[in-house]
Image (spheres, rainbow, N blue to C red):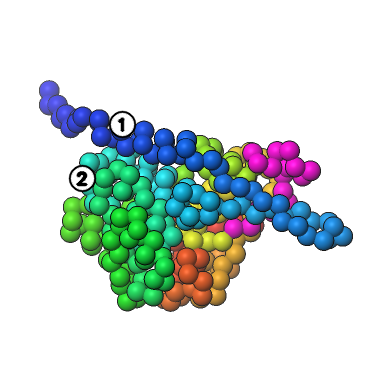
Amino acid sequence: MKRCDRSAPRDWVDNAVRLIDADSQRSADTHLLRYPLPPEWGVQLYLKDESTHPTGSLKHRLARSLFLYAICNGWVTEGTTVVEASSGSTAISEAYFAKMLGLDFVAVVPAKTSPEKLALIEAQGGRCHLVERAPDIYAEAARLAAETGGHYMDQFTNAERATDWRGNNNIAESIFQQMELETHPVPDWVVVGAGTGGTGATIGRYLRYKRHATRLAVVDPENSAFYGGYELGDLGFETGMPSRIEGIGRPRVEPSFVPTVVD
């Protein structure tokens, strides 16, 4: 009988997961802020402030999930170079986690990315690789990962699958736990922007899983492909240009966008 055994020591993996979990334990959840509106409007508005994560990046929660997903799948291990295609925000947090784990990190970003974001990536120990055309970041990130023998994190594909939408400290679970003692604990609407599409997918799935009547709205800036793809029912829709708001919207409809959960 043939036997193929590829088992390897998991000491590094165990410690990496411990370090990421410990970082999460040290960080209090982000605030859900009540925004004052005129009482006669009859509307209560809450804002979820994800900027209070340790890196100040709105994608810190996503980066944590992506690293755990890649490590537990065996794609990232000791000495792996991590490569990501990003408009900047996710790369800031991924650089933070890579540094924590002693891994090299390369962010492939459009050349027009703001100098402030590039500086924040580098401050976390990452290296920035600039490309002239925003739509080229995906292929260039995959090429660099193959060239270095590293791992392309691919947030735009993996965002919706790396996050456990049923719980495990995802943003949807956090919002509804923080709303429990409010006058209206189940909101009529949750409104999110589309970066990877993963946040909308997580919240939309969670609403169904918990049987909430809340509806989900996804907003998209000009020149981004999500709205056109949703309106036309075409997941292959592309604009070929960056959106008007850096970090929100994409030149193509990303694989992590799940239109069937968007109202």
Q: Nearer the viewer, residue 74 or 64?
A: 64
Query: Which portion, as a residue range, is magenta?
Result: 177-192
Count every numbered label the image shows and give the total. Answer: 2
Q: Quadrant of the C terminus?
A: bottom right
Q: Secondary structure at mark 1?
A: helix
Residue, disc 2? 79
- The prevailing secondary structure element of the residues shown in magenta is loop
Question: Residue 50 in the image: x percent, y percent?
Answer: 54, 52
Q: Is residue 229 magenta?
A: no
Label at residue 158: none
- Label 1 Cα neighbours within 10 Å, binned few <14 / some 14-19 / many ≥20: few
- On screen, residue 173 versus residue 115, left or right, reads right
Write the residue at 42% across / 68% down.
Answer: 116
Question: Residue 220 in the image: x percent, y percent?
Answer: 56, 67
Q: Find the residue positioned furthest to the front.
A: 123
Write the residue at 47% across / 37% down.
Answer: 26
Q: Secondary structure at mark 2?
A: loop
Q: Separation of disc 1 and disc 2 at Cα?
A: 15 Å
**First along the sequence among labels 1 and 2:** 1
Question: Residue 242 in the image: x percent, y percent?
Answer: 44, 74
Q: Is residue 154 visible?
A: no
Q: Tag 2: residue type?
A: Gly
Question: Residue 39 in the image: x percent, y percent?
Answer: 85, 57
Q: Quadrant of the N terminus?
A: top left
Label at residue 14: 1
Res. 113 image quadrant: bottom left
Name above or below for residue 34 compared with residue 7. Answer: below
Q: Is residue 179 visible?
A: yes
